[in-house]
Image (cartoon, grey):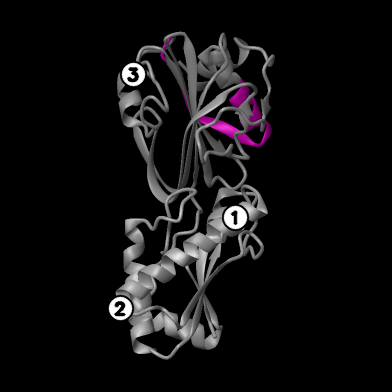
Amino acid sequence: MTLKSVLLPLIAAATLAASLSHASFADIAGGQDHPVTGRYDGSEMTGYSAREFDTYTTWTGAAFPLEGQVTEIAYQMPEGVTPVAAMRNFANRLQQQGYAPEFACNAATDRKACSRDLTYAVSRLPSPRMVVDSFNYAYTLFRDQGSGTTYVALLASENNGRTYLQASVIELEALQFKMVDADEIADELTQLGHIALYGIRFDTDSATLTPDSLDTLAELTKYLQAHADKEIMIVGHTDNQGTLDYNIALSTRRAEAVRSHLANALGSSGELMRAAGVGFLAPVASNATEAGRSQNRRVEIVAR
């Protein structure tokens, strides 16, 4: 069975009665539609995860791992929408943007290609965010035919009469943040007066520092210990998702969280450190893509 013969039934079987849009419904907190995939009109976002750099397992007849910027979004379709109809709409949007299928299968028509192994191997959000029936699902892996550096995996399944679809976007050229040490921090602050520390990260829509931030914070602490009389500004930055007031408040809380951590590590009151947030007012990349937004979400240290 050829790729074309597998995909065509998915495309031909459904109509475009429901269109993709960016409308807002009773979505999971902190989630947002991806500009590449959009959403099925009337659907509800049940799951969301955006990671700056991670491994994501796709399927091309066997498990196929990719590395890059990973965004996973799960939706529950409106009542009466089948997996084929949901897949058809997302596939149509992607093809209009220059994406082509690398692999496709439908468990209802091709159990060999759409084996149960696929549902266990591919990366997906956990139930109940994304619900998959191993005997009733469709899967398509698309790739951008322009740069060839962005993949989109679509997984649609029906469970208890409702269709769920997960759209996963993997951007291979997403920024891979390198670790900086105390000497590099000193050099950047001396030469440029500021440095962006992408190794300082937070939970989604939160000012809670993630555990993988500790190494960068330790190097920043070393720098401050070696320059005990140095005054610095800790400035939080966000992408442009949400209102300006909300993002300024969020970026300020994040900067304050860094200041508090450093003060505790140094055993001081932190009187030489000031925290501020500017939201999305100072981008360093376009907010039109997830890779660009990941560059804009950052903490900068500014020398005084």
Q: Residues at badges 3 and 2 in contact (C-beta under 8 Å)?
A: no
Residue 225: image location, x then y, percent: 33, 85
| Mark 2 vs 1, N-terminal side | 1
Q: Quadrant of residue 107?
A: top left
Q: Which residue is label 3 attached to?
A: 115
Label 2, residues with CA under 10 Å away: few <14, some 14-19, many ≥20 = few
Given the image, on which type of amino acid does mark 1 rest?
Asn
Given the image, on which type of amino acid does mark 2 rest?
Gly
Taking the image as shown, residue 247 lies to the left or right of residue 19, namely: left
Taking the image as shown, residue 101 lies to the left or right of residue 209, namely: right
- 74 lies above or below 231: above
Instruction: Measure the alpha-carbon separation of dots 3 and 1.
Output: 44 Å
Given the image, on which type of amino acid does mark 3 rest?
Ser
Q: Which one is nearer the viewer's eye here, 265 or 280?
A: 265
Q: Which residue is label 1 attached to?
A: 247
Indicate yes or no whether the magenta region holds residue 95.
Answer: yes
Q: Which mark is residue 267?
A: 2
- Magenta span of residues: 89-108
Label 3, residues with CA under 10 Å away: few <14, some 14-19, many ≥20 = some
Q: Nearer the viewer, mark 3 or mark 2?
A: 2
Judged from the image, the secondary structure of the residue bearing numbered disc 1 is: helix
- 299 lies above or below 225: above
Residue 257: image location, x then y, percent: 43, 64
